[in-house]
Each structure stands twice: as C-alpha cells, then as structure tokens.
Amino acid sequence: MSVNGYLSDFPLPEIFQLLQDGKKTGLLSIQALTSPGKVQTYYFIWLHRGRIVTITNRLDSRGLAALINRRGYLGKATSERLIRRCPLDEPLGRFLQTQGVLTSKQLQILFAAQVIRQICALFQVPDAYFVFDPNAPLPKVEMTGLSAVATEVILPGLRLIKDWSAFQEKLPHPQSTLVSLIRGQPNVRINQAEWNIWRLVDENVSLTQIATNLGLPVDDVQRIAFRLIFVGLVLEVPRVWTDS
C-alpha cells in the first residue's frame, strides 16, 4: 500500500503510528517544502516491520560510511574496502562489528546520530511532501543492524515542536482526565516535565486541575499529555456532561 500527502494534512506522528501499527516495511521519503531557489532537503526513512532501521538524507549508499568517517572510527579507504567485503544481505554496522572494527557502543552512537538527530531535525520542518514505498529494498549498507520502535523515536521530536497548529485538534481537552494504560513505571524514557504530569494521572483530576497544581499553562499540560498519550502511557477520558 502506497501512502502519500503533505505533513500539514497528515502529521508525522500519525504517519509513524500508522506504519508501526501496520508493521510496514519500506521507504518513507520526505521532501521539505522550501522557498524557490533554496536547496531542497530530503529525508529517507526505512522501516522493517514497523521499526525504524535507518535514516539518511542521501541515496548514494554512503551515508553510514560518511558518518563513520566523520566520527573517526575508520578511515575512508578502510571503510570502502570493508564495504566491498560486506555480504549484500547483512547490515554494514553488524558486519563491521563482527570484523572487530566497531564496538556495540559505537553502533549505538551511530544509530542515534542517524535516527534520533534526523527525526528531531525533521520536526522543525514547517511542511513537507511524503510518500511511502512498500516495495523499496532495505539498504543494508546504510544499516547499523539496530532498530527502534517508531513512537519512541518520535518522542524527542515531539518535545521540540514550536508550532502546534497542525496538532491543535488532536490535543486532549482541558476538562478531560487521564488514566494509565500500564502498571508500574513508564516503559519508555520520559523527561522531568512528562514525569510531573505522569505522577498526577488520575481519572478524577482534569488537565486544568493538573495545570493548576503544577503552576503551568493549560496548553503546556495539553501538549505534554498528548506526548504521553502518543507513546501509549495514558488514555484521555473525555468529561461526561450531565443535565442538572
């Protein structure tokens, strides 16, 4: 199934949620919409069964190699020689680890630079055109061998959003309450602001009351609650109005 459109109509978190829930494999290409004459910015995001495996902004199959070179893990000549030796069906990062030239920690650093930083940058794009191609082959030479659930990768990006107009209708109502969907502690990494909201989750306490308790603007609490809802920690419970 091919999916395409504009981020102004179909926000990025919803796209990732769709691809994650459908366990989709393929390439999500995103072209930032810029003013005429400006350099076009592209993001190429590959997923495997709903999990993000790599992100690049180039299609020459040398994005990961260039990142390895910039980090000083390998020289250009050495990395090119090893790329030629890498089996076509094995992620380059995993192959380099088996060869003893990269450590598991270095692979984690590379994956974070590939994925987390790119996603955060993408959330700063005002609008873009996207298309998902389920038939695009996975670029093993651009893959570390690591992957991440899409929603967990998006959480850092959601924290950086400055213009929430595209999400305004998606935000929980100020009079809604929240209920936890999990037992015990959060199973995703949340920051202090999110934790402050999380600890006050109560089906009898509205977002407006939480805002008052924390001394925060209601719209800030709505946005934080949206993030907690998006990653599956809580559920919005709309207030039920009854006749007196």
Image: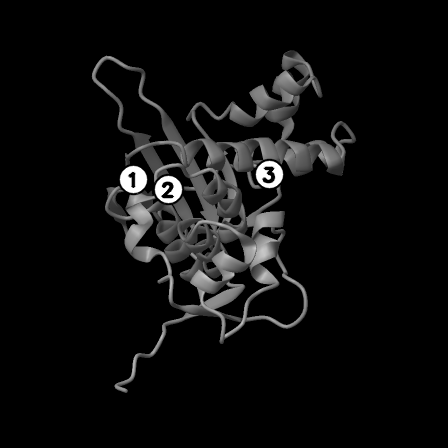
The percent position of residue 149, horizontal first and vertical second, equals 54, 52
In-image side of 67 versus 52 (left or right): right
* First in residue order: circle 2 vs circle 1: 2
* First in residue order: circle 3 vs circle 1: 3
In the picture of the structure, the residue carrying the numbered disc 3 is 91
Q: Residue at x 28, y 55 (%)?
A: 169
Judge by depth and name the residue closer to the eye, 64 or 187. Answer: 187
Inter-mark Cα distance, 3 to 1:
25 Å
Do the numbered discs 2 and 1 sit on residues whose CB atoms are within 8 Å?
yes
Judge by depth and name the residue closer to the eye, 90 or 21. Answer: 21
Neighbourhood count class around disc 3 (C-alpha, 10 Å): few under 14, some 14–19, many 20 upward = many
In which image quadrant can residue 174 be found? bottom left
In-image side of 215 versus 81 (left or right): left
The percent position of residue 230, horizontal first and vertical second, equals 45, 57
Assign the C terminus to one quadrant of the image.
Answer: bottom left
Inter-mark Cα distance, 3 to 2:
19 Å
In-image side of 75 versus 149 (left or right): right
Secondary structure under badge 2? strand
Q: Is residue 228 above or below residue 118?
A: below
Q: Is residue 49 above or below residue 234?
A: above
Q: Amino acid at mark 1?
A: Phe
Q: Amino acid at mark 2?
A: Leu
In the picture of the structure, the residue carrying the numbered disc 1 is 130
Neighbourhood count class around disc 2 (C-alpha, 10 Å): few under 14, some 14–19, many 20 upward = many
Inter-mark Cα distance, 2 to 1:
7 Å
Secondary structure under badge 3? loop
In the picture of the structure, the residue carrying the numbered disc 2 is 28
The percent position of residue 141, horizontal first and vertical second, equals 55, 32
Q: Is residue 172 above or below residue 77?
A: below
